[in-house]
Amino acid sequence: MSIKVPALQSFGDNLNVAVIGASGGIGSAVLEHLVSNPNVQRILATSRREPERVPAKTVWTSLDLRDEETIAAAARMAFNEDGLHLVMIATGLLHNRDSLWPEKSWRTINADSLRQAYEINTVGPTLVAKHFAPLLARDRKSVLTALTARVGSIGDNRAGGWHAYRASKAALNMCIKNVAIELQRRNPQSICVGLHPGTVDTPLSMPFQKNVPAKQLFTPGQSATYMLEVLDCLFPHHSGRVIAWDGEEICA
């Protein structure tokens, strides 16, 4: 299926953008869209490991969310006199093969799982905001956004479980709100939001796709398209909110 490339017309042209986590399923799809967008001038793409190929218009650098110095170094590379117009943090951790798996009950909560989830889902993205938010352009629309999840909503939680993931994403949502408040004092045209990408066919969701209706399971390209379209429709009064792929606001 052909996926159209969002125009990002509300951002203007000659865009400088950064994609944090550009090697992941969603991050790589976002990067592909941005490379294809004629309004995008320069892209900084980051990941822990060097990719086999760096696309046109793109500069790559290593960034580890667990190492603040790599985040600061990436921000120095991203610096541009015209400012950054879009920073997308496309990272997240739900499980791994060894020590982290979504908990079905409080009986299986353990400190190591909580630490891992917070480190990647909360601390890392918040440190990215610390170093990248000051780089946002001040004379036109600019957006800093991080992937969050509907299950991070406290008000929407009806099922329980998934303690580490839910709590780390809820904490991320609070950090997004905090950054948004401070950003608007310094940079009134800026926007800071959380984005829920939907259920996307990536390794993160793979073990949990069994009961997901086919129409609700997106390819990474679909999800990237939907989220970039949402960003194209945002204004400063949306800052601090968490918004789903379809433009629906998610309660805190």
Image: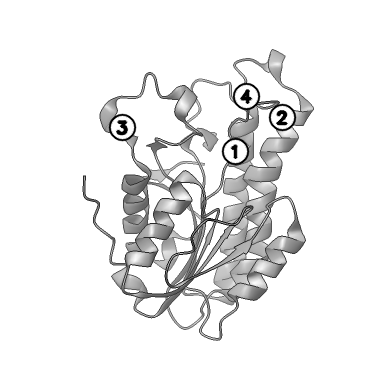
Give residue 208's position: percent from left, percent from top: 46, 23
C-alpha separation, residue under disc 3 versus residue under disc 4 = 23 Å
Where residue 155 appears, as percent x and y from the top left, is: 50, 33
Residue ranking furthest to the bottom = 81
Q: Position of residue 17 (x, y in %)?
A: 48, 69
From the image, tell me which residue sits under label 2.
Answer: 113
Question: Which residue is label 4 attached to?
Answer: 101
211 lies above or below 125: above
Amino acid on which disc 1 is placed = Leu
- Neighbours of disc 4 within 10 Å: few (<14), some (14-19), many (20+): some
Separation of marks 4 and 2 at Cα, in angstroms: 8 Å
| Above or below: residue 135 compared with residue 96 | below
Please name the residue that numbered disc 1 is placed on: 93
- Secondary element at tag 2: helix
Residue 216 - label: 3
Split into 4 quadrants, where in the image is the N terminus? top left
Is residue 88 at all visible to an observer of this figure? yes
Residue at left offset 56%, top offset 81%: 80
Name which of mark 3 and mark 4 comes first in the sequence: 4
Q: Quick one: label 4 or label 2, which is nearer the N terminus?
A: 4
* CA–CA distance in space, label 2 to label 1: 11 Å
Q: CA distance from mark 4 to mark 1?
A: 10 Å
Distance CA(mark 2)–CA(mark 3): 28 Å
Q: Earlier in the sequence, mark 4 or mark 1?
A: 1
Query: Where, by quadrant of the figure, is residue 182 drawn?
Result: bottom right
Q: Secondary structure at mark 1?
A: loop
Label 3 CA crowd tier, 10 Å (few <14, some 14–19, many 20+): few
Q: Amino acid at mark 3?
A: Gln
Residue 61 left/right relative to 119: left
